[in-house]
Amino acid sequence: MTIGELAAKTGVSVRSLRYYERQGLIVPLRRANGYREYSPLAVETVETIKLYLNLGLTTEEIAGFLHCVLKNKEAFCAEVMPLYKSKLAQIERQIQELSQLGENLRQRMQAIQQEQGEIPQQREVPEQRIESE
């Protein structure tokens, strides 16, 4: 199939398919006229690439294990689990950073509103400690 046909079957742009090719994720044959020709298995490969991109992985990360998962079950590819753990840790750090940014913004907004006299200034109440028996 041509690159246009592969794009139509997978919903991936021709430009992205060319990028996947440059990254070594898909490998078309070349016709005598220089046009790319993809096997029917290319559809499955592109769908697999889309799955991993949707998990937040980069094409470079995907390239490290794609051929393994296409031949075997994901569970049998040793490269996958460490990458998943690393990606999850990265996402959790980002969530923590974003939560802190959100709290900083809330505090700044409250400070601005207080300066504008929109809300009364809140006094801090000392925390009461409850001791267990």
Image (cartoon, rainbow, N blue to C red):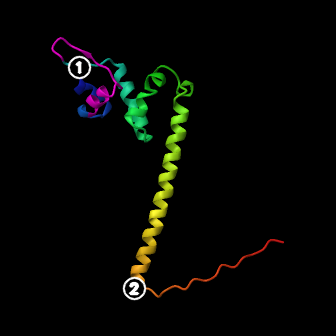
In the current view of this chain or complex, which residue is farthest to the right? 133
State the mark number for residue 130. Answer: none
**Which residue is under mark 2?**
115
Look at the picture and state if 112 lies above or below 75.
below
Q: Which residue is mark 1?
A: 36
Q: Position of residue 121 (x, y in %)?
A: 48, 86
The quadrant of the image that shows the N terminus is: top left
Q: Is residue 15 left or right of residue 64?
A: left
Membership of 61 in magenta stretch = no
- Camera-side mark, 2 or 1: 2
At x 42%, y 35%, the residue is 51
Q: Is residue 129 above or below residue 90?
A: below
Q: For the residue marked with disc 1, what is the amino acid?
A: Arg
Q: Quadrant of residue 132?
A: bottom right
Residue at 42% from the left image edge and 74% from the top image edge: 108
How dense is the environment of label 2, judged by Cα within 10 Å: few (below 14), some, or many (20 and up)?
A: few
Q: Residues within 10 Å of mark 1 (few under 14, many from 20)?
A: some
* Location of the C terminus (image quadrant): bottom right
- Residue occupying the far top of the picture: 32
SS of the residue at dot 2? helix
Which picture quadrant has residue 76? Answer: top right
Q: Which residues are magenta?
A: 16-34
Asked whether the viewer can see residue 8, the reply is no
Residue 124, can we see it? yes
For the point 52% across and 41% down, the residue is 86
Residue pictured at 21% horizontal, 13% vertical: 31
Instruction: Determine whether, in the image, residue 19 is placed left or right of residue 97.
Output: left
Q: Position of residue 49 (x, y in %)?
A: 39, 31
Q: Is residue 72 left or right of residue 109?
A: right
The residue lying toward the viewer, choosing from 32 and 86, is 86
The x and y percentages for residue 56 are 43, 42
